Image: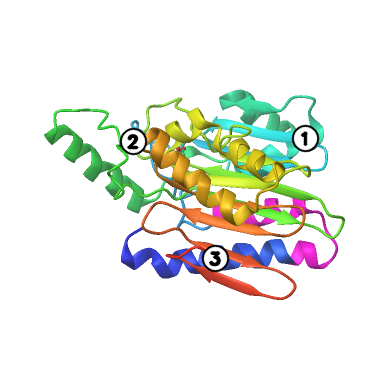
Amino acid sequence: MPDDMVDAHIHGVTNALAAGWRVLERGGAALDAVEEAVVIMEDDETFDAGRGSFLNRDGKVQLDALIMDGATLRAGGVGCVERLRNPVRAARKILSESPHVYFVAEGAERFAAEHGIALCKNEDLVIPREVERLRAYQAEAAQHGNDLFAPSSDDVTISHDTVGAVALDRAGNIAAATSTGGTLNKAPGRLGDSSLIGCGCYANNESAAVSTTGWGEPIMKLVLAKWTADRIQAGNLPEWSAQEAMNYLKQRLDGHGGIIVLNPEGHIGIAHNTPRMAWAYKTVRKQEAGIEKSAP
Ligand code: ASP
């Protein structure tokens, strides 16, 4: 992220942390905590989620989100939605009120509307900063004679601003949620890792709650969130497993990204192989937020 966006990111993740903590403090469920935390970041234009997201090649916002409950393995996902301010709210409705796990595009929007979630216009999600970002990107791509101008792993100047949260509640249950506008200039209909179970998000009380960000295609191919949870189920700590996941992403597919991990014992892992990633955590003893180094 650019230098002038650092404070906004720290502020955004700290607000999200407070919203999630309010739920946990009154004895609420981890599932509710991650939903509330992610809603705050979807509403914050700083991030690539909800309003203010990166635009796709057609200049539209197209959003993906997943929420997962570690106790029951229930999950709800939406992909390629264009008329939802808070895709994580729709994902949560799917988790709670549908026999299905995943809805896409108009079907997802119809499901949301039928379950009391107001639809918005796509233009309501588009902000001038992103119109300008897309314009500049496409102008540069045209100069390179390549419409798609696919991001490569060594291009860490391409920002990844997906949002995610993991939480552990008093009952000992963990949950995870991830929400994104995907990658800048993506092809319409392109789905990334964020809303796919085990790729950009995963939660299982037998292993860990995980949320990832970064270049989605390599993360999907490695099923990285589940890969990380498996390391924890095998007896490794989240701190080590998070770092290993980033090493694996880099070594195996030359990918870049970031990850947050939490196990049911309350151990956390935060790692990224990008120059920066905004994170914040709180326990009953301690609260920290940061941008460059990983938390302990
Ligand atoms: N992982 C997201 C995607 O590829 C993008 C991001 O994390 O910023 O859709």
Going by the numbered disc 3, the residue's amino acid type is Ala
Residue 83's x, y, as percent? 55, 37
User: In the image, is the residue at mark 1 within 8 Å of ligand 1 by its beta carbon?
Assistant: no
Which callout, 2 or 1, points at the residue further toward the start of the chain?
1
Cα distance between the residues tagged 3 and 1: 29 Å
Q: Quadrant of residue 117?
A: top right
- Front in this rendered view, residue 262 or 95: 262
**SS for tag 3?**
loop
Q: Which residue is mark 3?
A: 295
Q: Residues within 10 Å of mark 2 (few under 14, many from 20)?
A: many
For numbered disc 2, what is the local secondary structure? loop
Q: Residue at x 54, y 45 (%)?
A: 212
In the rendered structure, which segment of residues is drawn in magenta? 22-43
**Drawn side of residue 152 relative to residue 288, left or right:** left
Query: Label 2: which residue?
Result: 185
Residue type at numbered disc 1? Arg
Residue 106 makes an appearance in the image: yes
Which is in the foreground here, disc 2 or disc 1? 1
Is 126 located above or below residue 291 in the figure? above
Residue at the spot 49% in from the left edge and 47% down from the top edge:
162
Residue 268 in percent (x, y) is at 64, 59
**102 magenta-colored:** no
- Nearest the camera: 129 or 19? 19
Q: CA distance from mark 3 to mark 2?
A: 32 Å
Query: What residue is shown with label 1?
Result: 74
